[in-house]
């Protein structure tokens, strides 16, 4: 196969698409709605548990002070993050000060308190009054999500480095909030095309804005190996050099990967590393002949077929290789998870495959991590700590329920961000479905396949496979606005979710997203307020 990879959606193509899809559009609003503080309280995404609007505003003036209790380094970091967001000018940045007693009028107070513990460490309670702002949470994660709420309540001008008209008005009111699921994830495929550290950091920042808390990195596939492994250096040196379409590839040094883990941690996002195996391994097989059953290394692969590669599961060296990788990557990863892939293996017998998964999950467990695998692993013997990631729309979850293991919901026809929005979307695939914004929002993970017990469901995750995307701008075009839909499914209780209401709140994000320079798809299902 030979492909020319589009770099971005050509304007004429988008225009043509918009015309073709105008049947779904609502009439445009007569005038652009002004960005009033009172409106901003109603436009939060994801929708909080409860919102009360009071009269008045709290005005943030130059040199505003944020107070935080001493001794909690993470809470202090959250306060500094907020200070960066609201610093109106470099000459008079917002200040962060520690305080034990009451805070002076006119300031912002961040505090951790055990009172909200029942709602979990990610919950928070935010009170904004003309005399001051109080944000409390049982843990720093909740403070961080409260800060993201404050951010969405502020004018979109705060997202520009230069333009920050004074003062910044926050609408008075009260927000009490906590998430439905503990797993609100996104996956980025850095193997088919490589994304530089700064691109991944930008993706992390955008996830944080939506209160998402997992970034799964698909670090190895047939087309490329993307992380330095010191005990097997050729993986990155040789296996890192290819990409779909013959691009330059690339890989993260261990230092860069650790930096990404830390950057994500500061934003309360856990990195989940994936080394896909036993299939999707051509880059590794091409780097080390001994991993092949016939001892011969195949050439690098730059197409987009799947299922043709497999590690030699009958050779002991294969398990030494896996152990080394799990040890090295696991040691750099602060989170408890290690994703072993396990999808689309056409080269092995069922028995070989199941034996392999069983052995590998034990290696992962021996290194103190919980294994995650795509849903093909469900028939293998599974440890209670192993997690199944549901992705094939037609796959049953019977075994998952029977084995009482946990599941992450990523059904391809709803949650795959690499699916095109419609026929004319210039990038993306369509094997599972066309997924317009409403399709991405209007579904319920607990009842999609079987009636899953809520306790079995860790949450949801939106994968973005990169066969057809080569730049972060392409990634943004497919991820936004659908990522906002995924974030709300993950955060907001099912009975509070409503498409019409979501659509209105989504339209109000346009200014902020434009200020952030997000290359988002302006779906005709939404009235974007510019
Ligand atoms: C299926 S999802 C795959 C990936 C492809 C993707 C494209 C999964 C576990 N395997 O290898 O990139 O479809 O949509």
Image (spheres, helix red, strand yellow):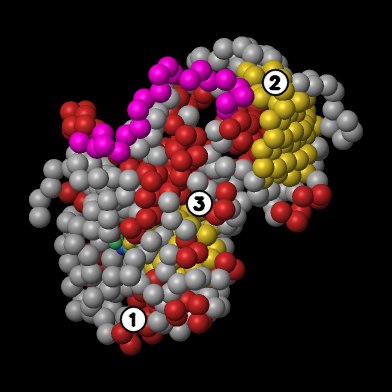
Estimate the x, y position of residue 12 in percent, counting from the top left.
18, 28
Give the label, 3 or 1, closer to the camera: 3
Residue at 35% x, 37% y is 525
* Range drawn in magenta: 20-40
Estimate the x, y position of residue 26 in percent, counting from the top left.
35, 32
Residue at 44% x, 31% y is 507
The mark that comes first in sequence, 1 or 2, is: 2
The mark that comes first in sequence, 3 or 2, is: 2
Overall secondary structure of the magenta section: loop
- Label 2 sits on residue: 57
Query: Does residue 24 belong to the magenta stretch?
Result: yes
Alpha carbon separation for disc pair 3 and 1: 33 Å
Residue at 52% x, 23% y is 156
Estimate the x, y position of residue 371 in percent, counting from the top left.
49, 70
In-image side of 335 versus 171 (left or right): left
In the image, 432 versus 259, the foreground residue is 432
Residue 470 visible in the current orientation: yes
Is 155 rendered above or below residue 425?
above
In-image side of 172 versus 450 (left or right): right
Residue at 43% x, 55% y is 443
In the image, 281 versus 121, the foreground residue is 121
| Mark 1 neighbour density, 10 Å: few (under 14) some (14–19) many (20 or more) | many
Is 404 rendered above or below residue 143?
below
Alpha carbon separation for disc pair 1 and 2: 61 Å
Please identify the quarter of the rendering in which residue 374 is found.
bottom left
- Label 3 sits on residue: 489
- Label 1 sits on residue: 353
In the image, 447 versus 521, the foreground residue is 447
Confirm or deny contact between disc 3 and disc 1 (CB under 8 A): no
Estimate the x, y position of residue 88 in percent, counting from the top left.
61, 17
Q: Classify mark 2: helix, strand or loop.
A: strand
Find residue 45 and name its label: none
């Amino acid at each position: 196969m030979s492909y020319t990879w589009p770099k971005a959606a050509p304007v004429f193509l988008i225009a043509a698409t918009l015309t073709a899809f105008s049947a779904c559009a609502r009439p445009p609003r007569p005038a652009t709605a002004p960005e009033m503080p009172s409106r901003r309280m109603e436009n939060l995404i994801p929708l909080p548990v409860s919102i009360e609007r009071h009269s008045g505003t709290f005005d943030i003036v130059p040199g505003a002070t944020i107070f935080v209790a001493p001794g909690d380094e993470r809470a202090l970091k959250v306060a500094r993050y907020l200070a960066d967001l609201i610093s109106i000018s470099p000459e008079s940045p917002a200040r962060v000060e520690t305080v034990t007693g009451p805070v002076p009028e006119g300031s912002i107070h961040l505090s951790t308190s055990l009172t909200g513990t029942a709602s979990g460490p990610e919950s928070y309670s935010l009170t904004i009054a003309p005399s001051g702002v109080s944000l409390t949470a049982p843990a720093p994660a909740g403070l961080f999500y409260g800060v993201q709420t404050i951010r969405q309540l502020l004018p979109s001008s705060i997202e520009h480095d230069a333009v920050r008209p004074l003062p910044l008005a926050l609408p008075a009111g009260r927000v009490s909030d906590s998430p439905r699921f503990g797993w609100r994830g996104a996956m980025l495929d850095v193997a088919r095309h490589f994304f530089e550290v700064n691109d991944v950091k930008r993706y992390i920042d955008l996830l944080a804005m939506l209160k998402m808390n997992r970034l799964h990195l698909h670090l190895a596939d047939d087309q490329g190996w993307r992380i330095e492994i010191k005990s097997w250096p050729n993986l990155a040196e040789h296996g890192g050099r290819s990409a779909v379409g013959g691009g330059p590839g690339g890989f993260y040094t261990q230092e860069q990967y650790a930096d990404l883990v830390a950057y994500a941690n500061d934003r309360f996002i856990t990195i989940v590393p994936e080394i896909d195996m036993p299939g999707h391994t051509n880059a590794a097989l091409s780097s080390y002949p001994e991993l092949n059953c016939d001892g011969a290394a195949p050439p690098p692969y730059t197409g987009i077929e799947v299922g043709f590669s497999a590690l030699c599961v009958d050779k002991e060296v294969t398990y030494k290789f896996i152990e080394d990788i799990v040890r090295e990557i696991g040691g750099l990863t602060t989170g408890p998870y290690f994703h072993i892939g396990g999808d689309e293996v056409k080269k092995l017998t069922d028995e070989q495959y199941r034996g392999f998964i069983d052995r590998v999950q034990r290696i992962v467990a021996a290194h103190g991590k919980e294994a995650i695998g795509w849903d093909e692993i469900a028939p293998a013997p599974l440890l209670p700590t192993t997690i199944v990631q549901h992705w094939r729309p037609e796959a049953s979850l019977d075994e998952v329920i029977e084995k009482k293991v946990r599941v992450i919901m990523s059904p391809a026809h709803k949650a795959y961000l690499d699916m095109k929005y419609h026929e004319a979307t210039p990038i993306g695939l369509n094997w599972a479905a066309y997924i317009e914004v409403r399709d991405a929002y209007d579904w319920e993970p607990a009842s999609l396949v079987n009636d899953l017990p809520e306790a079995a469901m860790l949450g949801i995750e939106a994968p973005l496979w990169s066969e057809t995307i080569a730049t972060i701008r392409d990634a943004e075009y497919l991820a936004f606005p659908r990522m906002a839909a995924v974030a709300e499914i993950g955060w907001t209780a099912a009975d509070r979710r409503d498409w019409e209401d979501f659509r209105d709140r989504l339209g109000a994000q346009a200014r902020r997203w434009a200020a952030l320079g997000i290359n988002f798809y302006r779906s005709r299902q939404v009235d974007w307020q510019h």
